[in-house]
Image (cartoon, coloured by chain):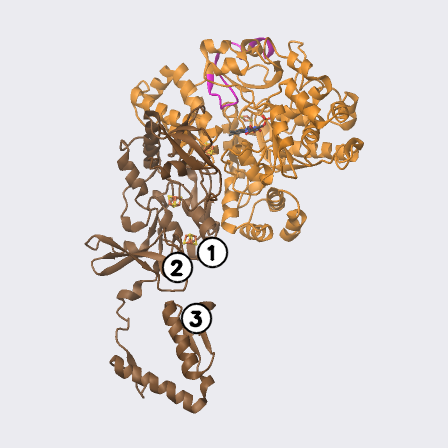
Amino acid sequence: MHQVADNTRTCTMTLGGGSVNFREGETIYEVAERHRKEVPTLCYDPRLEAFGACRLCVVEVEGIRNPVASCTTKATEGMVVRTRTPVLDKHRTTLLELVASENRNTKVDSLSGYASQEFGNLLDRYPVRAGRFAGKKSGTSNTDDKNPFILRDYENCISCYRCVRVCAEQEGDHAINVMNRGFHTQIITEFNNDLRDSSCTFCGQCVATCPTGALGDKKALRAKDTPGEIKKTRSVCPYCGVGCSVDILTKGDRVVGIHPAMDGPANEGALCVKGQYAFDFVHHPDRLTKPLIKQPDGTFREAEWDEALQKAADGFLKVREKYGNHATYGIASGRAPHEAAYTMQKFIRATYGTNYIDNCSRA
Amino acid sequence: MTDQEIIAQWQAQDAPLLPVLHAIHDRDGYLSDDAIRAVSKGLGIPLAELFGTVTFYHHFARSKPGHSAPRVCTGNVCSLNGGLEILEALKSEGATPMPCSGRCDDMVPVLRGDQVLVGHTADTLQHRPTPIPAPNSGGLEECVFRHIRAPQRNTLAGFRATSGYAGLEKAVTSSPADLVALITDSKLAGRGGAGFPTGLKWKAVAEASGVPKSIVCNADEGEPGCFKDRAIMDFDPHALLEGMLLAAYATGAPRGFIYLRYEYPETARSLQTAIDEAAAAGFLGENILGVSGFHFHLRIIRGAGAYICGEEGSLLNSMEGKHPFPRNRPPFPVTHGFEDLPTVVNNVETLASASHIARKGAEWYRGLGLGEHVGTKVISLSGDIQRPGNYEVPFGFSLQTLLHDWAGGPPPGRNIQAVTMAGLSGGFLAGDDLDVTLDEPCIRSKGSFLGAGGIMVFDDSRDMVQVAHDAMAFFAHESCGKCFPCRIGTQRLTERLNGLGPKKFPAWQEEVNDIGSVMKATSACGLGMAAPLVTESLLRYFPDAIELHLSPPQ
Ligand SMILES: Cc1cc2nc3c(=O)[nH]c(=O)nc-3n(C[C@H](O)[C@H](O)[C@H](O)COP(=O)(O)O)c2cc1C
Ligand code: SF4
Ligand code: SF4
Ligand code: SF4
Ligand code: FES
Ligand code: FES
């Protein structure tokens, strides 16, 4: 991620007619964004190294003949920048019309992914004429990729390579890349295989950054036709001690999907396969909702909590009586919060006087 | 050699990826999945990334027959001179088309393995050396071609006999800064297309911090209709080496690379011979000419078929084994070049010129131009012209004189309808605009540019819409796919020259103009900025032909 140290020099530039301060090292886009100037982008993800592909973010800089890409150009002292002019608006509209012309579908369900509406929203914001620049569509969809998580619908791909870059820069997996060149570029894994035959960990980062829904969240899209508004609830992933922030998507009383929280302090938009996709247990018919007690014939029967806890306590006591203090080993679940892990070790140490404790997520 | 032996041979060297891939490709004729896996592991490049990069290059095959199959030039002039027919005739041998491969003065080139054959039909293909530039038709004093026709000039002995390396010997008697000042004073500017002042570039690298620095000779010569660098390297390779040595002395760079286009396999061999000769005589290596601390080692890196790899950022990425997209600028190679260290990237002709300037002086060079213009330019002339070839002209020279007096004019009974500029990147000039002089201010005033100096001639029998289509199809084929305006724009413009898109002229024109203006203004590199000059100039000179193309008479 591009970060400017706090102690760099403060400079001044003119932005859209007004004088603004910035820190040396910031890009024009970062300055414009901070000052709430509308600059459209498609290939930009603030977590990634600026790439300069879509060219929507071009701005006019006095003294430079052609507009420059604001995401890749550093602001400099005294620079005079215009972020919106009739010429820039025209270029942006033409660019959007060109991109729309290569895609089969410019409106996708918002369950497709976190950023999936970016492209559609821009098309609505500019006076884009539908059907302009008609011609060949780009991208070959790989919709029968045999994985349960990620829809690979590249006919909607606009070759912004955000997926490739997030996989490399954020996830470090380098599972996907760009094949061919020009209009024939195509997002692929090694040898153009299915994702599960690659080094993909199904973290879903690529889905979350895709601005068109070309990469779609298959699990969330199951609820496409479920009636009701999508509600987002901020929470913390229950799986491990990292504590990634998530937004839980619900329709009615059902959890339909998970979005990584881009502002999550622990994860900054990252999740792993479990936090991203493993939420089916919530509504699963096999999910335990009552304690079960094992009977002598090996089958289970439902019980109330008081009975179950008493049964467990009896078991613990029996073990201590028969085998002594060090026969018990406590392992906290990686899914338990700190407080529960603390309670577990306290319980083992105080009642047994042993240090045999551990946590399942240390592997 | 096994994959592992090949990898071991290059692993510790600079820029190992292309040499490794070539060695395997030469050995097997293609790059197997297993080989790609081995290279990924050996060089530590993620597999998906390496796979993507391999598919970027036109000449890397992933199945047989690959390397041994004929690859036939179907570039703009070859397609009008038998290229398409040869391709058809050789289809049974697995022939595939390739873009202009820098032999437009002696058509049609067919690449078979590591040999270029030429001929106008499939059964007359033969191997022959590339044409040597004809003696200067106007008897004008030359710079780059000054000694190129001297016997054995391509050997060290022949080169020395015609004052070769004298410029270097002179330069090292004085300081690097003096050499930079001399080149600056000569007003030599880049001959690869962009025309950046060479002295300024060397100075910037000399003053930049970060070591080791590099000198990279851009010998990718991918621009259609350009074959001047090939002539220089084939007949005067030591002049190029001398130019690189001068750049090395001026900047303190110990490493040199010649990034050579794939389609020049014979040149790769002869250039290597020249490098070996120079090294044996002590012109390359350590403490060159007895100057302590003046070290320079030089290697050839062969490209693999990608026009964009002539763009310097893309070239440097290619050398580093990365996906060859152009780089965002700034920063520029003078501070962040090869391996993000200070690097001179210069064209072959630029460097060869420097070798003569070092010997004959700045004033001499400046005086070679006509009027207020400085120096000379090699023009590669091809197409419908009686004597195609490389011509060195003074800047400010009349195009008409070159076309008609020097090169014999169009074929008998024909008139010149249009010429391209900058190879293809400058689009067309036609009509009264053929009365230009060959210098940037004049040609830019017509909405074009001289660039690397390729000029293809089309006579009045040619269908200019078809010619423009083939030109745009080239840019679409070579667009790297990084930026939206070029990736989509070159495709849409090609389609519009091929019967797709609006059928009515005003609507056609509006679309083509809108695409063109967004490409010129917002593309991330020169390819996308220049490509629309083709349609722009077609609209300027040949609107009637477009109308006819849109609604052919029933
Ligand atoms: C698409 C594209 C292709 C280029 N191809 C070449 C080439 O084949 N050879 C070359 O010398 N320069 C080429 N250039 C220009 C280089 O980027 C660079 O400006 C040049 O090598 C610098 O050398 P010079 O200053 O000596 O001209 C190309 C530029 C672009 C945008
Ligand atoms: S799911 Fe994660 S690992 Fe897999 S391709 Fe996407 S970003 Fe890469
Ligand atoms: S799949 Fe999505 S993120 Fe990846 S390049 Fe295509 S549009 Fe961009
Ligand atoms: S202009 Fe074309 S070749 Fe250059 S970066 Fe953009 S897509 Fe690539
Ligand atoms: S956001 Fe700057 S080029 Fe895409
Ligand atoms: S060599 Fe075929 S067009 Fe140039």
Q: Which residue is mark 2?
A: A273
The residue wearing badge 1 is: A199
Secondary structure, mark 1, is: loop
Residue linked to disc 3: A360
Q: Judge whether B150 appears above or below A114 on screen.
A: above
Disc on the earlier residue, 1 or 3: 1
Residue B297: percent from left, percent from top: 71, 37
- Mark 2 residue's CB less than 8 Å from ligand 2: yes
Counting residues from the N terminus, which is met first, the one under dot 2 or under dot 1? Answer: 1
Q: Residues within 10 Å of mark 2 (few under 14, many from 20)?
A: few
At label 1, the amino acid type is Ser
The count of marks equals 3
- CA distance for labels 1 and 3: 25 Å
Write down which chain is painted brown: A
Q: Which chain is orange?
A: B
Residue found farthest to the left = A227
Ligand 2 is within 8 Å of the C-beta of the residue at disc 1: yes
| B426 magenta-colored | yes
* Residue stretch in magenta: B404-428
Give the structural element (helix, strand or loop) at label 2: helix
Residue at x 47% of width, y 11% of height? B433
Amino acid type, label 2: Val
Residue B366 in the image: above or below residue B214: above
